[in-house]
Amino acid sequence: MVSLINAANSLGLVTKLVRHVFPLVDIELEKWRLYAAEHCCPELAEQALASIENKKFHCQGGSIYSLYNGVNTTSCVRLIVALQTVSDYLDNLCDRAGITDEAAFRQLHLAIYDALEPTAPLHNYYTYYPFKNDGGYLSALVTTCRTEISCLPAYDLVKPFVLHLAKLYSDLQTYKHLDPTIRAPKMFAWATASLEAYPDLAAQEFAAAAGSTLGIFMLCALAATPSLTEATVKQTYTAYFPWISGLHILLDYFIDLREDQENGDLNFITYYQTQAEIQVRLTHFLQQALLNAQNLPDPIFNKTIVRGLLAMYLSDPKTSYSPEKEIKTALLSTGGNYTKFMYALCRLLRQRQLL
């Protein structure tokens, strides 16, 4: 009976996400699309518009945190869409414009820090970047995040953890976009220096966990609770980093593996030696993510996140071929029957072009 109630609550969460939150995401993204189209110079407008068009599902997935208990959904969607749009835009600037300058990447990613530190002065993000005239687009995104954060009663409690995750994210994005001849050594040296605290992780797994924004979103959602305790913050941080965040990005790279290999792009999955090792490590991250989610204050919510990650990524058509298909089947089996149901739901949403 309890499992049926949990499944019903989880399904209700997904239904609200699709019916009520996705339209809010669309409204916010359209606002930023119009801003970029009207104000950015052609080179920056191209990257801004491409990031919105091609990475919409990042905002859709992240917006589930707007349904956390006690959160103002509209305000939280505004925050998540703005922050994720900053992330996706910067990714395009670093990845698509033929630039490989480390100083430029670090300066650009100060926008992530500024978005999450409302009391700090804004930086000039384009100092070392060849194109600079965005008509205030990036600063407007940053300011929107700060405005919404200022309404969170317990943000000071989560801020040290949020800023730490932002630093890890910015470091990773800086290293991973460097010239292919130097990016791997620099990235692995950076990740390896942190592994003493995470003896169960390989360097690429630490890097993967650093590449997720989900921990930031969850901590910001927690900050809407006036009675939040530091113990809950630490417990949530530990659940997300490295397990839930690591699972998120490893799945993202898993579905892009074949495409990245063909294009010579960096992919963390290629650092595993065999298909069996890929399956073992993804399964381990899944099991740890579910175990840690179970111990959080709202286990149904957080386990829905974990199962939703599996369903969203593994429903991508790119997982329909061997050997990805065999690994997908094993992961869905580990996730259980409700994960399989969510997987079927995501496939339906893809068919209807809602995901």
Image (tube, rainbow, N blue to C red):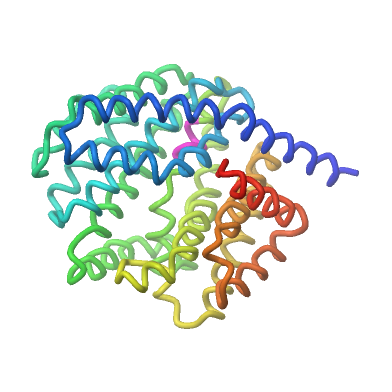
Q: Nearer the viewer, residue 84 or 133?
A: 133
The percent coordinates of residue 335 (x first, y second) are: 69, 59
Q: Quadrant of residue 228?
A: top right
Figure check: 239 above or below 126 = below
The percent coordinates of residue 154 (x first, y second) are: 48, 23
Position of 144 with respect to 228 (left or right) is left
The residues colored magenta run 216-220
| Residue furthest front as drawn | 352
Quarter of the image that includes the C terminus: top right
The percent coordinates of residue 258 (x first, y second) are: 43, 71
Residue 215 visible, this orientation: no
The percent coordinates of residue 76 (x first, y second) are: 49, 26
Q: Residue at point 12% right, 49% down?
A: 103
Quarter of the image that includes the N terminus: top right
Q: Magenta stretch: dominant SS? A: helix
Tally of numbered discs = 0
Q: Quadrant of residue 19?
A: top right
Q: Residue at point 66% right, 31% down?
A: 16
Q: Residue at point 41% right, 21% down?
A: 148
Figure check: 115 above or below 328 = above
Figure check: 343 above or below 85 = below
Residue 233 visible, this orientation: yes
Figure check: 116 above or below 161 = above
Q: Nearer the viewer, residue 233 or 284?
A: 284
Position of 247 with respect to 118 (left or right) is right
Q: Residue at point 52% right, 21% down?
A: 74
Q: Quadrant of residue 268?
A: bottom left
| Residue furthest right as drawn | 1
Check if residue 20 falls in the magenta segment: no
